[in-house]
Structure formats: structure tokens, C-alpha cells
Image: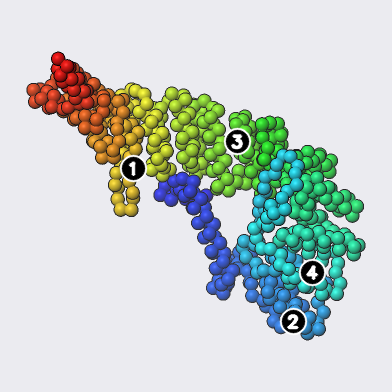
Amino acid sequence: MFQDDPFLMPRNAANARLYSLSKESGKNAAKYIIENFPQYFDKTFAEPNVPCLMPKSLTPQTEGVSEEALRERIHLRMVKESVDMFDQLLQAGTPVSLETTNSLLDLLCFYGDGEPTPEKEQEEKEEEPEVNASEQKAPKRQFQRGSQSSGPRWRENNHAERIFKIMPERNAHSYCTMIRGMEKHGAYSKAYDMYIDLLNERHKADVHTFNALIRAVPYLKERFTERWELAKEFLTHMAQQKVQPTLLTFNSVLKSLRRCGGVGRTMSLLVLKEMEALDIEPSLASYDHLLSLFYKGVDAQSSDIISEVLNEVEKRSFTQLSNLTGLLQCCDLKDIKLAYQLNKALENGDNWKFLDVDRLNGYWSKFFSLLCMMEQIEVVLKWYKEMSSSLFYPSPKNILDLLQALDAANQLEVIPSVWEDVKQLGFSRRQDLLAELLSLMSRDQHPSETQLAFAKCAEEIKAAHEPAGLGQVPLEWTGSALGHVVVLFSRAGRTQDAWNMMEHFQKINRIPTDKVMDEFLNCAKQTNCPDEAIKMVRLAASLGLLSSQRLKSRTEEEFELSETQKKALESIKCDGDSSDSDSDSSDSDRE
């Protein structure tokens, strides 16, 4: 998907999404230019000429007012021009054939009486609200709001209804088109009334019309049992009219059952058995509806159903695009075996193509978090290193999960390489990540080689807290972050760098902990820097810390001080000294 150029490779999931959207936007822009300005692409240089690769002519070739001109405009999906041409034919007294009128109804019902756009040509994705496990009557306001999905609405007395009413004759195709258009654009009650009119006229509906009516069931009835009874009634009518159900029919039933609570979970298994009896193989959409019924809105404790679904999916390579949201829920069940099974199913054939950039990265993010929680650290690191950068972009949560896994396995020496990935991913200014990294690196003592690597990481983290250039605001220091950096510099023997960080405590009005000061004193002792030790005692005294006297005593005992250094140390007045002098003066007063 991405160019084989490090400069053009996205660094994180946000950049990858922006890249893919930009690429798709460029394709749509090119398509728009070619379709709307075909006159600039009328020269053919290809030999032999390939017509399917040439721009399509979107300009009507038939002039005048005639039924042939009307059919051409319907074919070109020119909604407004087709309606105007139809009205002109009626005003001129020219009869329009039933076939042409039905074609016009098809156009109007598909586009909702509006002009076609790229967005309208894609089916609107209906949101699936969660339902309670117990059957209850849905509140009226919530029920009405749920029926309003995104997209164009069916207007009252629109062109489709007007043309349908003035048709001299109507056949089953006319009624079925109106029913499907009304269902598509949210007029569910009208669609049901139109179906009753179809039955009264002794016409038969086709399988696509029944599919639309079944999808409308949740908006026609409020109680869960009533919804199932109505769906069952439509299935009975199909049997009476000898209409053979298809895969889409059963998928429509399962989709409606998702809004039937506990009734839906019970009846969905019977629907699958009926599909098996009719030798109809479920699709990915069927499995998605089934898993949404059992693993959404209820406590998903059992993995039996999703395991059986994965067993079926593993055996097949799907060719029709569908929704994998239900299958991806296995990562939320904290079942590592199911996660491996799902990953194996995605690797079968071209199944991985069913996930777009967002869902693919979301899947790998969940999968990797589950690995960090359930697997040994060797397995986690193997997956982490083998995952392609264009396949998986770790999120900040994934990095935190990896750090926790490294901590649990006592392999913190891997942190410097993780820090390199954090910089590459653009997370080097995330306060939560920086705090966790510094906390883990400074918590325990490590071999000198590891401490030097930790100090290098701390230096780069320190750089993020300093002004870097125009338009970049430095991060604010916290007391804990300052202390961790001092500890890391001290353990690496970088006394001067550690002291520079110690001076920041006064600047931001923070108090260093006893551990931080002891680590700095140990570093000053190892590098034989008594001047820095005296500075640290003076800093502790200026902050009024109770530990200043203890630090002063340590400096006197553990360092070889010159006379000048001894005088400088003795001149520092600590809280302990003042308290002792006060007690001595009080004792002398008593005497």
C-alpha cells in the first residue's frame, strides 16, 4: 500500500490513515475530473483501443422529448432531467410504457429523489444499538430516534410517490420498487402499507422486497416478541408465494434479531439450522450478526460459539466483503487460543483484505495487547519484532502493555530499543509514556552497560523538556520525572549532568526525595566530586529538608575534604543544626 521509501513511510497509525485517505482522495479526484470533463480526454493513443479504459460519455446523445430520450437519461442516472422529461411527455399527451416508468421509479427510489453522488452510491451503514438482555418495551422517544439513520430521508409526496399514483397501470415490479425505496430511506411504515396494497392487488413480492421488509421489522414493532413474529410472518408469506430465500434473506433475519434481545439469541440458532437445511452456506456477515447477538450487550463469558465460528471460518477463503467486527471480539475475551485461531483464519487466502487500515491496525493492537497479557516475554518480543511496520503501528497503550510485560519478566534491558521505537512512532512527547519509561529505568540498579544505555535514554527525554525550536512548546517537568533523570545520570557516573538536573528542583518549586539525593551523593563519591556533594547539601538546606543534616554528616565522613571545603560545609546551616543550637540555649537558660 505504501511507497518503498523510508521518507514516505507512515510513522504511526494516524499517519497511515492520513496516507491511505489521501491516496483514495486522489483517486476520487481523478475520477471526478475524467467523468465531468471528458472533452479533455477524447484523444485515443492506445492501439488497440480499450473502450472500458476510456472515459464514459455522460452527455445525452438523444435530443428532443421522447421516450427514447427519457430512457437514455435514466440510464445516465440524471434524476432531475428524467423527471422533467417524464412530466413533459405527460403534458404532451404521449403515453410512457410501463417498463420505462418502472425504470424511472427504480432510479428515484434508489437515490431518494435526489441527484446521485459518490456517497449515495454506497449503501448507508446502519448503526446497531445495543439491547438489554431482558425483554422490555422500548420508550417511544428512543424508538423513534433509533429509526432515524444517517442519509437522505423519504420526503412526503415526493416524485416517486407522485409518479406511482398517476400510473395508469402498476405491476408487481412497481410495488416492489416502492417498498424497497421506502425501506432504504427510512419510511418503514409506508413500506409496510405498500406491501399490504401489493397483497390486495394480488401481486407477489420478489425475494429482494421480502429482504427489505425483514430489515424494517425492528422499526415496525416495539416489543422483541412482536418483532420476531412479524419477521416470521414475512417468511411464511415467502413460502406461500413460493419465493426461495437466499443468503441475504437469512442475513436480514439475523440483522433484525440483533434488535430482539434474548429472543434474538434464542432464534438465531434456529435460523442457522434452517440455512443448513436449505444448503445455504453462511457468509462473514452471517457470522458477524451471530457473534454480535451473543457477545454484545451481555456478559460474554463463554467462548464456545465464537470457537465454533472460527472453526468454520478457518476452512474457507471468503471472496465477498463483509464486516469482521464480531470476530474481532475474541480478543476481548482474553482467550489467547481463540486469538491465534482468528489470526490463522485471517491469514487464510485473502481474508486479511476484509480489514481496512483502521480495523487492521485496531485488530493488531488488540492482539498484541493480549499477547503482552497472556504470553511469555520471548513470544511477545518475537511477535513485536516480526510485525511489519506497514501492518501494525503500536499505539501508546501497546507500548505501555509491552513495558509492563518486560517488567513482569524482569527484562528491562530491552527498554532502550523500545525507546527507539517510541521516537520513530512520534510518541516521544507523551507524558504517560515518558513517566512509565523513567520509572522503570530508575527503579532498580542494573549492570553498568545497561545503566549507560538508560542514561542515554534519559538525556533524550530531557531534551524533550527543553526549548527545541520555533512553534514547539517544551514539556513541563514534574518532580518525579526530574528525580528519575537525576537517578539515571547518577548511576551512570554523569555527576555534572545529574547536578544540572538537581538545580531544576528549585526552579520549579519541587522537593527531591531522599532516594534522589542519596543516589546523587553516591555518584559524587564514586567520581570524587566533593564540590558537587557540598552543593547538594547547600541545596537541601535551602529547601529546608530534614535530611540536610544527615547528608552533611555523610559528606564529612565519606569525602576527603580540603580546609576550604570543610569551612564551606560547616558554613551551611541545616535544620538539624538550628534545632540543636536552640535546645542547647534552652538548657543553658534553665541552668
Give yes or no for contact between labels 1 and 3 (Cβ–Cβ under 8 Å). no
Please rate how many residues cluster around mark 1, counting C-alpha atoms within 10 Å: few if below 14, some from 14 to 19, many from 20: few
Give the distance between the C-alpha atoms of the residues marked 1 and 2, in whole angstroms. Answer: 72 Å
Image-based side of 206 in relation to 39, left or right: right
Pointer 3 residue:
331
Q: Which residue is pictured at 74% across the width and 39% down the height?
A: 134
Give the distance between the C-alpha atoms of the residues marked 4 and 2, in whole angstroms. Answer: 17 Å
Which secondary structure lies at badge 3? helix
Give the distance between the C-alpha atoms of the residues marked 1 and 3, in whole angstroms. Answer: 37 Å
Give the distance between the C-alpha atoms of the residues marked 3 and 4, in whole angstroms. Answer: 49 Å
Which secondary structure lies at badge 4? helix
Place of residue 319 in the rendered image (x, y in percent of width and height, measured from the top left): 68, 47
Image-based side of 299 in relation to 514, left or right: right
The answer to which of marks 1 and 4 sits earlier in the sequence is 4
Q: Which residue is pictured at 75% across the width and 66% down the height?
A: 106
Residue type at mark 4: give it.
Answer: Asn
Place of residue 292 in the rendered image (x, y in percent of width and height, measured from the top left): 68, 42
Toward the front, the furthest residue is 590
Q: Is residue 77 visible?
A: no
The dot on residue 476 is 1
Image-based side of 262 in relation to 199, left or right: left
The dot on residue 88 is 2
Pointer 4 residue:
102
Q: Is residue 392 visible?
A: yes
Which secondary structure lies at badge 1? loop
Choose top left, top right, bottom left or bottom right for residue 488: top left
Choose top left, top right, bottom left or bottom right for residue 175: bottom right
